[in-house]
Structure formats: C-alpha cells, structure tokens
Amino acid sequence: MKNHHYQTRIIWTGNQGAGTKSYAAYSRDHEIQSAGKAIIEAASDPAFRGNPERYNPEELLVASLSSCHMLWYLHLCAVNGIVVETYIDEAEGWMEETDEGGGFFKKVILKPRVTLSGFEKMELAESLHHRAHELCFIANSVNFEVACEPSFLSE
C-alpha cells in the first residue's frame, strides 16, 4: 500500500491592530499555501463574519469533492475509450449548524455536465460516474452523503 503526505500552511492575515481582543476586533482573512503553488485567499463564510470575496473552508470542501470526482471520471473515460470534450460541475453542499454553534455537512450533490464526442458508449459513460465515486479519495474520507447527478451532451 502506498502512503502519501500533504502539507499546507495557513497564515492568518486578519489582525486589524487589536488581535483577537474581541470577537468583532479581527478579520477572518487568511492565506492557504503549499510549496511552489499560488496562494489561495480564504476567510470564513460571511455568516460567520467572513469576507465574501474569499473562498471559505466549506466551499473548498465542496470543491475538493467535485475536483476529485472529476479527475477520477476523466481518467476512467480515457482508459475506456470515451472522449470527454467538456466537463463542468456546479456542485452544491448543505451544512447544518448545531445549537452549540458547531455544525456538520449533511449532503453534497455533484452535478457534472459532460460533453462527449459521441453517444456510442453512453451507458458506460454514465456508469463510470459511480466508479469514480467509489475511487474518490475525498468522498471516501467524509461521513456524509455525496450524490452525483450527471447530465450529458454530444458534440
């Protein structure tokens, strides 16, 4: 079995002069970094005093699920002779807050719109979404439902 290691750096950039003197005294802005890659400017969700112009952790979780699924799907199509021309996913996720102030994701729905070069292998193309979900590292790491509702077009 192969093991993989991932490392990121989070830097809080939201000290507005008073640190965390009070809940309203600081910005939730931060940067996500990984060696040799572009910086992702992030914050908390605007509902939690975050900057609406930056990605928040909840969006990044949904994006991670979508990205992992897409990469597996494209791989499976390539090795099965299915030519994908375009792939756009408009994924959605739902989180519920608890009375204690915490929360959890209840569900994510992936909604990939896939353009194929033809419909000769449509049944296989549809089934590969299920296989991609089974193989997705991120989907296998979460404890909530991740559904997939693909649609197809042909060039």
Image: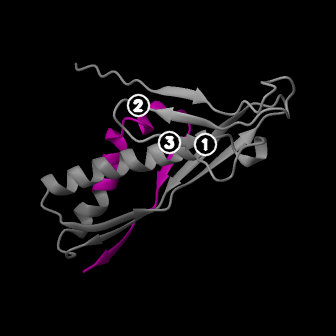
Residue at point 21%, 51% (across, down) = 76
Say which quarter of the image contains residue 28.
Answer: top right
Q: Eyeballing the image, is 144 above or below 72?
A: above
Which amino acid lies under the numbered mark 2 shown in the image of this protein?
A: Ser
User: Along the polypeptide, which appears first: circle 1 or circle 3?
Assistant: 3
Crowdedness near tag 2: few (<14), some (14–19) or many (≥20) residues, C-alpha within 10 Å: few
SS at mark 3? strand
- 47 vs 130, left or right, is right
Say which quarter of the image contains residue 120.
Answer: bottom left
Q: Which mark is residue 34?
A: 2
Range shown magenta: 128-155
User: 87 or 147: nearer the eye?
Assistant: 87
Q: CA distance from mark 1 to mark 3?
A: 14 Å
Foreground disc of the pair 1, 3: 3
Residue at point 29%, 47% (across, down) = 72
Q: Eyeballing the image, is 83 above or below 142?
A: below
Q: CA distance from mark 2 to mark 3?
A: 9 Å
Quadrant where the C terminus is found in the figure: bottom left
Q: Position of residue 92 (x, y in %)?
A: 57, 55
Which amino acid lies under the numbered mark 3 shown in the image of this protein?
A: Ile
Residue at point 85%, 23% (across, down) = 21
What residue would you read off at disc 1? 58
Crowdedness near tag 1: few (<14), some (14–19) or many (≥20) residues, C-alpha within 10 Å: some
Q: Eyeballing the image, is 123 above or below 50?
A: below
Q: Which mark is residue 40?
A: 3
Quadrant where the N terminus is found in the figure: top left
Contact, CB < 8 Å: mark 2 with mark 1? no
